[in-house]
Image (cartoon, grey):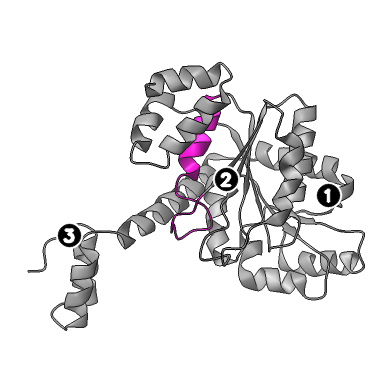
Amino acid sequence: MTIEELVAAARNGSTRAVGRLLSLIESDRRSEVLAVVGHHPVRTIGITGPPGAGKSTTIAVLVAAYRGQGKRVAVLAVDPSSPYSGGALLGDRIRMAAHVDDPDVLIRSVATRGHLGGLAEGVPAAIRVLGALSYDVVLIETVGVGQSEIEIAAVADPAVVVLNPGAGDAIQAAKAGLLEVADIVAINKADRDGADQTARDLHAETSAPILKIVATRNEGIAELVEAIDAHLRADDPERRAARARAQVLSLAQSALRVHPGLDGLAKRVADGELDVYSATRALLGGPDPG
């Protein structure tokens, strides 16, 4: 099937065609797919946080909440087989299994494939495809490992950071850089001891709204959805431009790592034939340093 035929089939409800399109945007045919689907804005929500915080469980109940509103929902779960997560599988992703047979819910794992950020390189393209296929909400789950998560702010608005109660958790999240991307903070498992203290600690570290939830019991989820919707309504051109800039820089950095001239320039710098400034200019397309 041509890309046009795949798009038509996907719009007619073929989940196989959707999967094929999402596979193509992870290949060298990405630009062909994007040329066909065009631009269709879609609500994109990032869910991040440290391993074990309950991100997948939170996503599962958010999916149920949006389905209750009649919305079509897609979940892009970043494949945890990246260097950042040590290759461990996220066992709690099974929580999403309740939505597997729903034709209006798509759950897709995407591989990082060595991309530097916390997201996979194909995620921005996947979001565009899903928007073109009339999904109303895209939820992105990331592995939650610190500074690399800054990239989620480039494609999602808002970014929701999920944390657990516990002594020092708020401070550790701040040190790891998670609170830098937090538009909303959700303290999951808030029925545990220390939830109130964690909320107080977080208020000292971030100005983002802080909510307490118990995802396994669906407690606080309606309030979380309200906070997400309120934040999205507050979006503006300046924030969109800032996210686009971060996205371009992140993808450019990954592209430069595999630039065919990088190794040769690095060797010349190491051998003392070239200074790093001239090498950098050459890598960015400047004049050949000779």
Residue at 59% in and 19% down: 13
Q: Nearer the viewer, mark 3 or mark 2?
A: 2
Residue 215: mark in rendering = 1
Q: Residue under label 2, please give it.
A: 109
Cα distance in 3D space between marks 1 and 3: 52 Å
Query: Residue 7: x, y in percent?
Result: 46, 22
Label 1 CA crowd tier, 10 Å (few <14, some 14–19, many 20+): many
Asked where in the image residue 212 lies, by quadrant, the reply is: bottom right
Asked where in the image residue 3 lies, by quadrant, the reply is: top left
Q: Nearer the viewer, residue 97 or 40?
A: 97
Cα distance in 3D space between marks 3 and 2: 38 Å
Q: Which quadrant, please, contains the N terminus?
A: top left
Q: Is residue 78 magenta?
A: no
Query: Residue 134: x, y in percent?
Result: 58, 24
The disc, 2 or 1, on the residue closer to the chain's N-terminal end is: 2
User: From the viewer's perspective, is 265 left or right of 223?
Assistant: left
Q: Which amino acid type corresponds to the residue marked 2 in the rendered image? A: Ser
Residue at 89% in and 69% down: 194
Q: Is residue 259 above or below residue 46?
A: below
User: From the viewer's perspective, is 258 left or right of 128?
Assistant: left
Q: Nearer the viewer, residue 2 or 243?
A: 2
Label 2 CA crowd tier, 10 Å (few <14, some 14–19, many 20+): some
Q: Which residues are magenta?
A: 111-133
Q: Is residue 12 above or below residue 234?
A: above
The disc, 1 or 3, on the residue closer to the chain's N-terminal end is: 1
| Secondary structure found at label 3 | loop
Q: Residue under label 3, please give it.
A: 286
Cα distance in 3D space between marks 2 and 1: 21 Å
Label 3 CA crowd tier, 10 Å (few <14, some 14–19, many 20+): few
User: From the viewer's perspective, is 138 left or right of 191?
Assistant: left
Query: Do we see residue 219 in this rendering?
Result: no
